[in-house]
Image: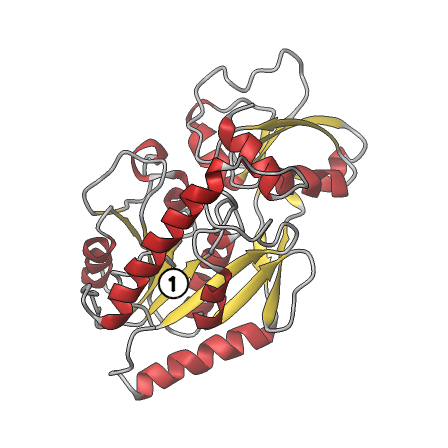
Amino acid sequence: MALIDRLESAWYGSARVPWWTHALAGLYGAVVRLRAWHYRRGTARRVRLPVPVIVVGNISVGGTGKTPLTIALAAWLSARGYRPGVVSRGYGGTQREPQLLGADPDPSQVGDEPCLIRAGGVPVAVGRDRSAAARLLLEAGCDVLIADDGLQHYRLARDVEICVIDGVRRFGNGHLLPAGPLREPLARLQRVDLRVCNGGHAEPGEYPMLLRGDELLAVADDRRQALAGLRGQPVHAVAAIGNPQRFFDTLRGQGLEVIEHAFPDHHRFMPGELEFGDHLPVLMTDKDAVKCRRFAQADWWRLPVRADLPAAFYEALGKRLDALRRDTGSPAT
């Protein structure tokens, strides 16, 4: 088992993390606090854009459901008459310069998550310099921006911060990296505008979010079938996401017999890597499917999910956006 796997098992289990991780966590915490202090004080410059910026992120490593929430937000904003765009770092891709994604982007260049978001028809820009990438969206006519996984990217000024929380794993042992899974101290939650709990039990002040999906789509073409149609059957389940177990548990919850194949987050699949020597169907996440479409076989299927949130969440977000319209000089969070 790789070191990161051993550490993750300790973060979310009863095992102790290695002693040396606590010393590194102390150093990491000092750097995080110093960096945040400089941005709050104004000695580190922020880039303020002329449109509202909504940041979606988390304070822990691993998948919490940021991308499905980003897609849901873009759809909600479009329905309200906005022209939303999404800016992303493009993790897993090789692209470094700011780029506005076309209709059929290459996930190996721009990352899997931006490709998944772009597939829904939303303008997406990627780049290491997110403020420069965001300007490409402004030039494309966007009047509100969503920064996917941008909570720790303080250089881009934001008007609304949304933190997504894994409702099952929560914050593990509560320690900072590498002694625990936290990117920032738990106190950071008190400074965000909205907290969303993905699955599990939402605590006071959190809006519950459920990821729903009941139909499988072929990776190679337009065929469809109900997920329930595979109930009681063995399947290969492939996941290269932050928390693969969430996907496996979803399939088991629908009565499927799951053979697990977990890969590192953002893993770049190659032809032949998902051939398991039998004729069982292969099921994967939407995020993984965008990287396998060019060499997909007939019995490979993806499970699209949609983020289901209460009306109260959107009402709270709407009030913040309405306030920004009335006061265009609203300061960054």
Residue 123 as seen in the image, left or right of residue 62: left
For the point 48% across and 43% down, the residue is: 22
Residue 333 spot, x, y in % from top left? 34, 73
For the point 57% across and 45% down, the residue is: 304
104 to 159, vertically: above or below: above
Tell me which amino acid carries mark 1.
Val
Q: Quadrant of residue 50?
A: bottom left
For the question of whether residue 142 can be seen, the reply is no
Residue 176 spot, x, y in % from top left? 47, 50
Residue 248 spot, x, y in % from top left? 66, 37
Residue 87 as seen in the image, left or right of residue 189: left
Residue 332 as seen in the image, left or right of residue 168: left
Residue situated furthest bottom in the rendering: 326
The residue that label 1 is drawn on is 55
For the point 65% across and 56% down, the residue is: 199
128 to 30, vertically: above or below: above
Secondary structure of residue under mark 1? strand
Where's the N terminus, which quadrant? top right
Residue 119 spot, x, y in % from top left? 41, 46
